Amino acid sequence: MKFLIDNNLSPVVANLLNQAGHDAVHLRDYGMTAAPDPDVMDRAATEERVLVSADTDFGALLAQQGADRPSLVLVRRLSGRRATEQAAIILANLDTVIDDLDAGAVVVLAEDVLRIRRLPLLPR
């Protein structure tokens, strides 16, 4: 799977996902550390990467745009965790959510939470 790791997560997360056999790039690798969220989403969508972030703004942007891409893995309540733990939780849940991410989804991961919402996000 191809991932784009947001600035609010360590580049170590990208390295660990790469070591696990995935294609992961951190925003720093593109020199996009100050890029606005819409540009980050466009980059992920253009490269068919799953965006991995702790920033809930991406879910709101996907909903506002009615977009069906890019998929988003939203890492919640793990921001105080080490990058190794964050990557481990992503990898531990990947088999469960891979079909959803391929189809277009927002996946919320926390230590004891896994939520999946298919894209496009519709108003409730």
Image: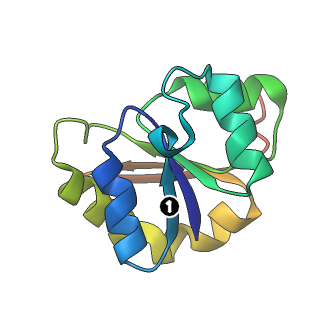
- Nearest the viewer among 13 and 110 is 13
Q: Secondary structure at mark 1?
A: strand
* Above or below, 41 relative to 68: above
Circle 1 residues within 10 Å: few <14, some 14–19, many ≥20:
many
Question: What residue sits 55% from the left and 58% below the top?
Answer: 3
Question: What residue sits 45% from the left and 80% below the top?
Answer: 21
Regarding residue 112, the answer to whether it shows in the image is no
Relative placement, left or right, of 18 versus 24 is left
Q: Quadrant of residue 124?
A: top right
* Above or below, 119 relative to 80: below
Relative placement, left or right, of 76 versus 68 is left
Question: What residue sits 49% from the left and 45% below the top?
Answer: 29
Q: Position of residue 16 (x, y in %)?
A: 32, 66
The amino acid on which the numbered mark 1 sits, given as a three-letter code, is Ala
Tell how many labels.
1
- Nearest the viewer among 67 and 45 is 45
Q: Position of residue 116 (x, y in %)?
A: 56, 53
Q: Quadrant of the N terminus?
A: bottom right
Mark 1 lies on residue: 24
- Nearest the viewer among 59 and 15 is 15
Relative placement, left or right, of 26 versus 71 is left
